[in-house]
Image (cartoon, helix red, strand yellow):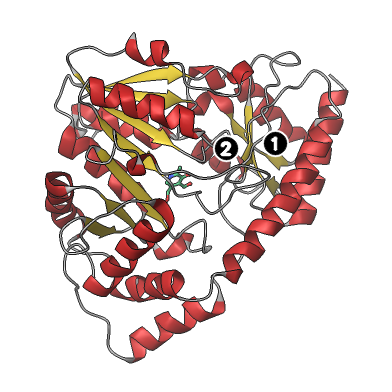
Amino acid sequence: MVNENFSAERLKFIKPSAIRRMIDLSAGMKNVIHLEQGEPDFTTPEHILAAAKKAMDEGYTHYTQTPGMLELREAVSEKLSRENGIDVDPKTEVVIVSGTQETMAIAALAFLNPGDRALVLEPYYPAYFEDTLIAGAVPVPVPLNEKEGYRVDPEELEKRIDSRTKMIWMCSPSNPTGHVFTKEDLEIIAEVAKKHNLLIFSDEIYEKLIYDDAKHISIGSLPDAEDRTITVNGFSKAYAMTGWRIGYAAAKGVLAREINKLHYYMVLCPSSIAQKAALAALTGPQDCVEKMRKEYDRRRKAVLKELEKIPEVSFVRPKGAFYVFPDFSRLKKDDENLAKGLLERMGVCTAPGSGFGESGRGHLRISYSAPYELVVEGISRIVAALNKI
Ligand SMILES: Cc1ncc(COP(=O)(O)O)c(C=O)c1O
């Protein structure tokens, strides 16, 4: 009989994502406002769609090279040099992947041995934690202090490092907090990584969604980090291309080579049509990105204005991505129950904060990637419900 005894040991450790669980719970419910997913509501910009249609018409329907079309790798390399201060050889140090998510499994499997340890800056994007477990390694959360605006404390990093520590997982701008790491914080991480000879996995998928006075800096551009950083990015968020499954990893020398080795056995190569679309995204007009960013900013301000109406709720003003991560614990300790209650009673779906690490307990992740009117209605319902507690 086929039963769970067939499942590999590693699956026993894997938790289903908190976001997925909420989506499953909301299935079949009517008039739910979805603020749990980080899914741009915009359609992919017209010139990108046109490039994909043209690619199909011109017969780009075959396998490409495993690391992707050279033309796209060159465009990525130019972009990284121009915008991020990262210099990588397009021939050997850029790998086009089937979505940024693929790079997390690859990085864990390529660089972590069973029993190795990897620091995860917390609150974290759950795949860093789970992929570390899939590799048989040990994720070691480093809770960032919310009261100090998620600043990085070198001592907090140092005290969790031992001889088995190999890597640091990080994301700036952050999912779930929207925090944008400062240059000082990045320098601390780079310095610690160099001192202990650690790799840095830097997920920069939200780099284009920056607000107020914040500035995105790539840790891979810092001298202490340039040889040890795997910089990953994708087209899903900046260009509203979640369904295209296309992104890239850039890293020096052997790192990129090893990534490409696993990439071959995982996907063979990324979609040829999506690569042509990504090329148009990178080399075409960028005003579409700015237009979407401005609209996210409008929604962000509306959400923050509503949240400020509840004095018991605290939050760090997000300056990036499209999430806010308020702490509701003074009103309700259990974030799972809070999220379930808001869904069942108010018809608003959010993600419980504990799904992003222990220090997220008592928080909710609220995404403002849904249309403005829905975001405003959703947050008003949340505030109305909390005012009754
Ligand atoms: C931090 C972060 N990295 C990566 C991804 C996945 O990106 P992609 O669509 O490129 O696989 C997400 C999606 O929500 C994300 O929030």
- Residue on which disc 2 sits: 22
Disc count in the image?
2
Residue 5 horizontal side relative to residue 101, left or right: left
Q: Position of residue 357 (x, y in %)?
A: 47, 23
Nearer-N-terminus badge (2/1)? 2
Q: Which image quarter is the N terminus in?
A: top left
* Circle 2/circle 1 CB separation < 8 Å: yes
Write the residue at 72% across / 40% down. 348
Q: Is residue 68 left or right of residue 143?
A: left
206 lies above or below 289: above
Q: Position of residue 163 (x, y in %)?
A: 17, 13
Asked if 175 appears above or below 31 in the picture, the reply is above
Q: Quadrant of the C terminus?
A: top right
At which x and y percent is residue 2?
Answer: 21, 37
Mark 1 is surrounded, within 10 Å at the Cα level, by few (under 14), some (14 to 19) or many (20 or more) other residues, namely: many
Q: Nearer the viewer, residue 236 or 150?
A: 150
Mark seen at residue 343: 1
Q: CA distance from mark 2 to mark 1?
A: 9 Å
Secondary structure under the numbered disc 2 in the rendered image = helix
Ligand 1 contact, mark 2 (Cβ < 8 Å): no
Q: Secondary structure at mark 1?
A: helix
Task: Name the residue type under label 2.
Answer: Met
Locate residue 58, reporting x and y percent.
31, 91
Residue shown at 40%/33% (left/top)?
170
